[in-house]
Amino acid sequence: MDRKYLVSNIGIGDLIFFCCSIILNHKITDTIEVKLSKNTLKEYRENSTDYEVFCKEYIKHFLSDYTVNFLSEDTPTNYNWELEPDLYDKIFQNNLVIDKIKDKLNLKNDDYKDCIVIFTKIRDLHSSLFSMISEDFFNYINQSNKKVILLGEKEIKYSNEYSIHGKEKIYSIYERCINNIQKDKLIDLTIDIYEFNNFSLNSILNDINIINNSSETYVFGGGGFFCLSLFTGKLKSLTNNEYKVHFHSKYNQYIVSNTNEFIKNIQDS
């Protein structure tokens, strides 16, 4: 399969699905030729060289069984890779793909095994919907006998892509978590703010390893860690209806788009 891929969607969620599509469509003897879109880097990633390096390391990590060749900017491509709706079904109905990705997430045991993880950044879920379930959610968390790990950002930097979506669709629940979860339960592993120049493969893998070792993980809405958490079997989420249709499956039964259903799920836990 002589494809030279142009990849324009370069978020960490997009790229994990790109890696899955390679596993689905290529033999491990194939050389995978990839060009990351410079236009996307300029428009949405502040033309960050560090972020481009991160993307390449990330792809190589998940496709370590393959030879991956990154093409220069002036090299022509013949295949524009896009996220197609049927790709998700193909992935989550294929145990080989799930196992290959999960193997790359399961790095080691850590000191935080069997905790509840809450990811503080929410995207693609209107803030009013989180407010509707927040009291029941925090009550459930406080009644649990488990420690609670906070991952993600304390604050959101609203520039480029984030400014387009706005503060009702991309926001942090860090302060709500700090103010509503019992202090003796909390393990705060958040960072102040994400910058494209401080993305690193090690930090992403460290966070997803904590998620993989959790008893349950809450990533609301969508985003990169929502997509990575899909492979852990630990994800519980209130999300939008489009994501629910794509990602609710036997492997991910606790992805819902109805607030009452989410509340029922946690009450029945």
Image (cartoon, helix red, strand yellow):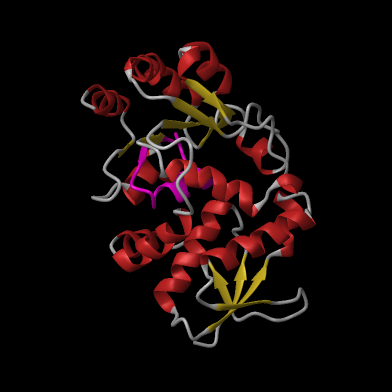
Nearer the observer, 97 or 113: 113
Q: On the picture, is 242 further left or further right than 63?
A: left
Q: Reply yes or no: does residue 168 show up in magenta.
A: no
Q: Position of residue 167 (x, y in %)?
A: 61, 28
Taking the spot 50% from the left edge, 21% from the top edge, the residue there is: 186
Q: Is residue 6 visible?
A: yes
Q: Is residue 50 left or right of residue 234?
A: right
Query: Closer to the camera, 266 or 263?
Result: 266
Q: Specify the quadrant of the image occupied by residue 27.
A: bottom left
Residue at 55% in and 50% down? 205
Residue 188 locus on image (x, y percent):
56, 26
Return the residue found at the far left. 268
Q: Is residue 155 above or below residue 11?
A: above
Q: Is residue 124 toward the left or the right of residue 198 in the image?
A: left
Q: Residue at x 73, y 45 (%)?
A: 198
Q: Which residues are magenta?
A: 218-236
Is 249 placed above or below 163 here? below
